[in-house]
Image (cartoon, helix red, strand yellow):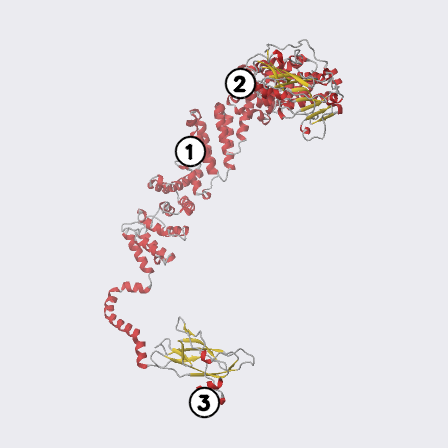
Amino acid sequence: MSRDRNIQQHYFTRDREGIFRTNEGFDTVAKSAGLDNGFIKAALHPYCVYKAPQELLARGEADESRYPEAFGVFHADSGELVIGRTVYVSADFTGQRSAFFTHHYVVPKERQEAFVREPERLLAIRDFRSSYDIQDGKSIPELDELDYDAAAKPENPDRLLGRLKLDRTRFQQLLCAVMASLTNKKKVYVALDADVSAGSEEAKRLMELVYRCLPYAMRRQLGFVTYQSEPEGKQHYHVMFVEKGSIRLPDRQLEKDYLFDLPNERVHGVDVSGTEHSYLDYVWEYRGDKAGLERFYDFCEEALQDVGHPVALAVPTYSQLSELFRIEQGQEGLYEQNRAGTVKGILQYLTAETAGRKKRLNDLLGKLIRKELMDGDSVPTAEFVTPLLDYYAFADEGTKTLLIASFALYIRRAASAVSGDIRAAVPLIDPLRKQNAVFLAVLKQLHEQHPQTAEQYAAYRITASGSVKEFLEEIKFWLMSADDLLLQHFFRNEVLKKMKQLLKAEKSRRMEVAKNTYIYFDRLPEREGKPQFEDFCMQLKLEIQLELLEGLTPTGLSYEDLLQLEFMLDPPQPELLHNLNSGGRMTLDLLTAVYRVLTLERRKPSDVVATIERLGPLDLERAQELLKKTLGDKVGPETFGKIAYAFSRPDAGVRGGGGYEAGYDFDRMLEYVAAQTRGTDTIYEFMVWSAGDSRFSGGSGIDVHYRAALTRYFDRHDAKAFKNKPIKELLLGVPNEAFAAVFKDIKLKQDPGIIQFVLRYKRRLFRLGILVLPLLLIIILLSTFWTPMMGSILRPAPTLTVETLPEKTAQPVVTVKASATDGGYDPSPNIFVNGQHVGSGQVSAPVVLMIGENTIEIKAENKYGKASEPIVKKVQLDLPMQGPPLPASGASKAGGASGASGAQTSTEPVAGPKFTPANTKGKTEQQIQSGAR
């Protein structure tokens, strides 16, 4: 990096030693004092390289002048402009090896603009060195200026392009690729169809033409080199001219870049056909006109101030600017082809911050606005007007006045073009609403010059409101923008008409819509600080109420609907009362009465009574039916007091017989509450609540009519209420003694007959109980001990029952099932089988059989020692010849298990009867057993 504003120099070659090495080799051999060593290594050394053309090496060319120089230009990361040349050296200091010599000029960032605007400063430098003797020292001077041929003229573009076989399309492709490479990281590789020795000079001439055809912003980024032996990317080089024949395809790496293999007439990666390329057409047209190009680039420089690199380096930017430049130069046909696009294009570059520095764009836009104003046949579009509205925000006062007049005229033209239909002008007017000052100024001018247009637009906007929200927002807009217009008669009519339409359209939300609209207009004068709108808003509020009442059916209203009528009913406004006919007044009185009942907590009960008493019999009935309907799903402690009014009888009084009629229909009231809250305890809560309300109490603590109604209710509908303990406790615990007495009487009526009898004759029953109690004790004792006592005295024998056993069987075990009873004295007598105890009460015991006839004896014995007659069963066991071995009779044991109810089942087999063969008669048991062995 250079440390001052002077131009630094740098020499690089192969020598005995260098600045960064003490032995022989390639290195920096001399530099200016202002060059930083780190900058040299990082920014310059990577570009100190040269590979001789293969064609010259192959033929052993010794003439150094035949080898192409590599002239390179690039911009370092730190902003310096580096201009360098590398030449082939046939023999180094040893005289035995070839080398190369690189000479760099490093131009500080602050001084490079002259090189950008004057290409000859880059491409016609005279003082490049081709060699250096290190004996002259390692420091070389800094330069104030570079010596260049200021009089040098570029070659005729057509002759150059013709020689290089580049037609219009090829040149535009090359130019487009160079411009695109500045931002998309692709490289441009060009192989010229020229002699290898002349290739670098031809590349330099072509780059001079390309450089002159690039805008300044792109020149400030471009890097290129006129010779490389083959395609090889370098960071800051965008365009590289390579040796003929070095672009070899297919090559995946190369195919990502832009390739111009001119000897083989191949161009890869770029196509300008079918795209908009006004800029390319312009530079082709002025390719030989240096002044014409510079005028355009100066225009671009002004337009692109403060826009940033992405825009300044984009190819479409210059196509757009070239059209604007042509229009500025008088080609108005381009403007007429795309009026809106032209204005929008100008305002892409013209902002509040830069408008003062972009006079040419300002002047061009003003010129186009005046042209549009004078063109009587022109009807601009919304796309044309919208950008101008943005421009208005930072335009000078003269231009603002011009724009207001233009907007008003455009609107009139648009409306007139379709026989005065304002809808054609709406797309032009609506964008103006975004800037209130502009809209107000245009509307004022329209109202002064052509009031019908202004009125039509206002009417259109009001009519176009699709909902109440949009309608109110529209009213608010006009209040803020043109409040004097609201006072015009036509505007009032449109507002009233639209409001009626909305009320009719919003059937499901009719009450809500009316309420919100009424409240909006009621608060508007004070909220906006505009008392002049009092009369206007009063009229609108009246119309809202009249329109609402006209289509209102009270029976169709819900609880929520009635509450939303607060604005009209609490209290009714005198203006409304004066404008109602008799039918409307009756409806209003009915709704007012119902509303006051529903909002009882806000007022005195006497006011509600007075309102109800003003109703005629028919209206009273309708009002009470509406109350029942609206309170139906809301019956609860908070509405108990309101429900009573739905059953009141304002005309009740003394009857002819001297009695009094009830002031309320208590029977229906109780039935209503019960029906609406079926399945809950609300009816009982209502009864408890009524004990504390004066409408239900009389001189004795409870109204006699209500007392009778309560009794009838329980008799007819709830005859078992007091069997429910919580309900009984609730009702009997009422703090009003008169009510508690009534509930006790009702409870007594609902008690079972025996309880009623006991309660009625409890004193007599008490005396009788004293006499009967000893007798009852004796009976209880006898019933408890009678059976055991009689059993021990009578000692009855148990009765035994045995289920049938088979007479013959092939199974070695049979099950004996038996049960025993003795008439209740012993519930579970013991049961014995073959003398073994097997259970009590009821048993099921297995018995092991012997071959032949088996005798089984069963008997029962109770706890008093009495036994039943034994029952004997005989079973013949016949086994097959090859059967399982029989168990020894002596191994069998009797056993049993008792059940839960006294029945027992034997789980072990009972030994069968002894079997005595015929030939053992008269022998002892010992003899028999001995014989068996």
Categorize mark 3 by other alpha carbons within 10 Å: few (<14), some (14-19), many (20+): few
**Label 3 belongs to which residue?**
923
The answer to which quarter of the image holds residue 593 is top left
Q: Which mark is residue 353?
A: 2
Would you say the residues marked 3 and 1 are in contact, meaning their CB atoms lie under 8 Å apart? no
Disc on the earlier residue, 3 or 2: 2
- At which x and y percent is residue 495? 50, 30
Tell me where residue 154 appears, x and y as whole percent: 70, 13
Whether residue 930 is visible here, answered yes or no, is yes
- Residue 343 seen anywhere in this rendered image of the structure: no
Q: CA distance from mark 2 to mark 1?
A: 62 Å
In contact (CB < 8 Å): disc 3 and disc 2:
no
Residue in front for this viewpoint, 567 or 245: 245
Dot 1 corresponds to which residue?
578
Residue closer to the observer: 389 or 88: 88
Q: Secondary structure at mark 3?
A: loop
Question: Quarter of the image holding residue 310?
Answer: top right
Quadrant position of the N terminus in the picture: top right
User: Where's residue 803, x and y in %?
Assistant: 46, 79
